[in-house]
Amino acid sequence: MSFKDKFQDKILGWIPEDKIRIQMAKNDNSRKGGSKKSPTEIKRQPKTFEVKTLKDWKDAVAVATDPENSSLLFLAQLYENLLLDAHTYNTIETRIYRVLRSKYKIVNESGDENEELKVLFESPWFEQFMRYALWSMFTGPKVIELFELDDLLEVKKATLIPMEHTNPRKGIILKEPGDETGWPYKEGNLSKYYLQVGDDNSLGLLNQLTPLILAKKLAMGSWLDYIEKYGIPGVWITTDNMTQERAEELLAMGLQMISNHVGVLRGNEKITLGELPKTDAHKTFSELISVINSEISKLVLGQDGTTDHKESPGTYGSLKVLAEVANDRHESDKLFAQAIVNKHLIPMLIGLSSYYGGLSGHRLEWDESYDMPNSEYIDKVVSLTQAGYTIDHEAVAQKTGIPITGYNQTTPPTEPTKEPGKEPPSK
């Protein structure tokens, strides 16, 4: 390593942790050594959460879709705020985790599976990448960095460039949100290490969910205001003592009565408790929030029967239809992820490092084979054994985890031999 390379690596170590580095390769061959690189900083912005309104949503969409100079800063801030809603975040994660936990295999052009190549994807970076890629369906395009390699030239991690630091229409990464110029990642040296997932003009499904989530936040905020105002009845103290000293004593007593419920009065003084409103606040606010949650589930999952209406079990047929609707979206998500891996990720990995050279001519396919539960598997084994079939006990032990060392052939019991002069023992 030259003195210049060592100096550059030293500089990299001084960069503060609160900044993200956009790594730029000096030439096509230098990256393979993992040393020659020049850092370019992008400035992270502090995260602030403020109350968002429909006007904020409209303004964010207008700026994000500006044909002259679009910016995703306000949309990114809005989406971060919306995803604080637990129901919305969980329904989206439900779709994403179904894909992340689906079985897959790496096959060649003939469809033959290659177990050794599959190991290349059994790493945290691949799940990070897939997670970011799938989130693009809900928040719009994601720009993902695959740059850092270990000593074996294997990818160490997938890094997401913050949404506000990207301009997908121009294909640039911005040093600061709102900049009109930046580093191009769709062409040139950076194109080897950065991959955009999602269409340039997409705002994601969260754009459609925004009015619902804002309405839900308003309902919950109004409910909290209602509780603060009317949750504890007001206390009214009347006195004919007009001295400031007595007024302060009664005020202190009234405040203490919130927890103690005890008051000491004199003469014509009296305490009156306010009445609670007759309106059923729980019904008013809770039902509105339930309706909004149901609408969110329908937009994300295609149905709400598996998330919101547990009090109404429904029939087997209706639940099956709902499951099929959710499965349609799952199959679509898998197709989306498969296309990203095969058309973009695998070629990128091959060009990134010789470690992934064996992926040439291979692709990812979803493994649709059915994993039979152990209890069902054992029942099948017993049934086949009783039918006279010979079972590979080593395969059974490997599948079930039950150590099997051999097979005992049972024989029917025989009648005891009768000795002369003796009766056989009674049963």
Image (cartoon, helix red, strand yellow):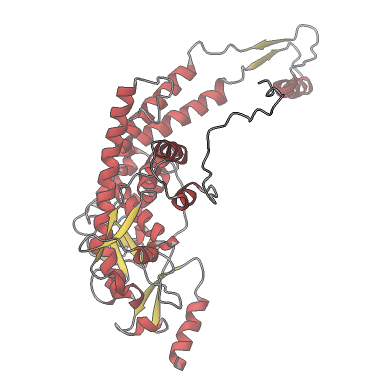
Q: Is residue 391 above or below residue 289?
A: below
For the point 42% across and 46% down, which residue is it? 391
Left-right relation of 173 to 199: right
Q: Quadrant of the C terminus?
A: top right
> Camera-side residue: 223 or 364?
364
Q: Is residue 382 visible?
A: yes
Left-right relation of 426 to 374: right
Left-right relation of 404 to 328: right
Q: Is residue 231 above or below residue 176?
A: above
Q: Residue furthest bottom?
A: 2
Residue 130: give x, y in percent of width and height. 35, 56
Residue 281: give x, y in percent of width and height. 48, 18
Q: Is residue 99 above or below residue 163?
A: above
> Camera-side residue: 354 or 188?
354
Q: Quarter of the image holding residue 312?
A: top left
Q: Residue furthest left?
A: 67
Residue 215: give x, y in percent of width and height. 37, 32
For the point 20% across and 62% down, which residue is it? 110
For the point 66% across and 16% down, which residue is it? 235
Residue 241: give x, y in percent of width and height. 76, 14
